[in-house]
Image (spheres, helix red, strand yellow):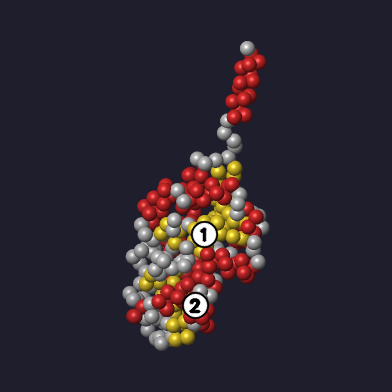
Amino acid sequence: MRKFIIAAALAAFAAGPALAETIKVGVTPGPHAQIMEKVKEVAAGKGLDIDILEFSDYVVPNQALADGELNANSFQHQPYLDNQVADRKFDLVSVAQTVNFPMGVYSKKVKSLDELKDGATIAIPNDPTNGGRALLILADQGLIKVDAAKGLKIGPADVTENPKNIEFAELDAAQLPRSLDDVDASVINTNYALEAGLNPKSDPIAREGEKAPYINVIAVSAKDKDAAWVKTLIEAYHSDSVKDFVNTQFKGAVVAAW
């Protein structure tokens, strides 16, 4: 009888739940980190433990992923990832869309772009994709015209018409909220606007459309794209619980893209 009990106990132990797999996911502070915390809760119920690492800029998370220090990251839109892969030869791929952060133009000095004076200074991100994105917003608002042949990859040199002689100050994206006291307007990514206490829904004097091609993605190393944990991570992110959290927490400032 004792042997039977021991054998049954061992069998039950062997058939019990496996230890959770742990992955490291890089995010930027603010919404991406907040959303990933909710994803972590959902993923835990699916046997996947997520260790969240925050990075204060846009460059390091892809380098860390390429170096194997991360298993995935969730902080960037597809054009930014494409540019990083092209410029730095990273073997990284996107595996799922996440959320969209409509970019906004903010100002402490004017209430509309029409009020900008000749020679006004507008701060924009200094990385190629977000800088181009900022210029496209200004072009959509009729403030400037840009070289359409360049597509999304444009910079101040690609401005073809600038009737108000706007000066462009190219700054690190994280520093843009701090620039508002020194410039006439600043085009700020939503995550950094939220972190600075700005309301991306009501504070901008101009705002990007929600259907712009800058939906954020989950990126992984190409060798891992078919891994079981990737599927679980996507399922957790694309859950109704996470969508409800995004809608409730950010009230339209961040838009679920699934």
160 or 116: nearer the viewer: 160
Q: Is residue 161 visible?
A: yes
| Callout 2 touching callout 1 (CB < 8 Å) | no
Q: Residues within 10 Å of mark 1 (few under 14, many from 20)?
A: many
160 or 223: nearer the viewer: 223
Quadrant placement of the C terminus: bottom left
Residue carrying label 2: 169
* Viewer-side label of 2, 1: 1
- Furthest-top residue in view? 1
Residue carrying label 1: 217
Who's the residue at 55% across and 56% down the image?
95
Q: Amino acid at mark 2?
A: Ala
Residue 46 picture location, percent across and down = 52, 41
Q: Is residue 92 above or below residue 153?
A: above
Q: Amino acid at mark 1?
A: Val
Q: Residues within 10 Å of mark 2 (few under 14, many from 20)?
A: some
Who's the residue at 54% across and 47% down the image?
232
Residue 38 picture location, percent across and down = 46, 48
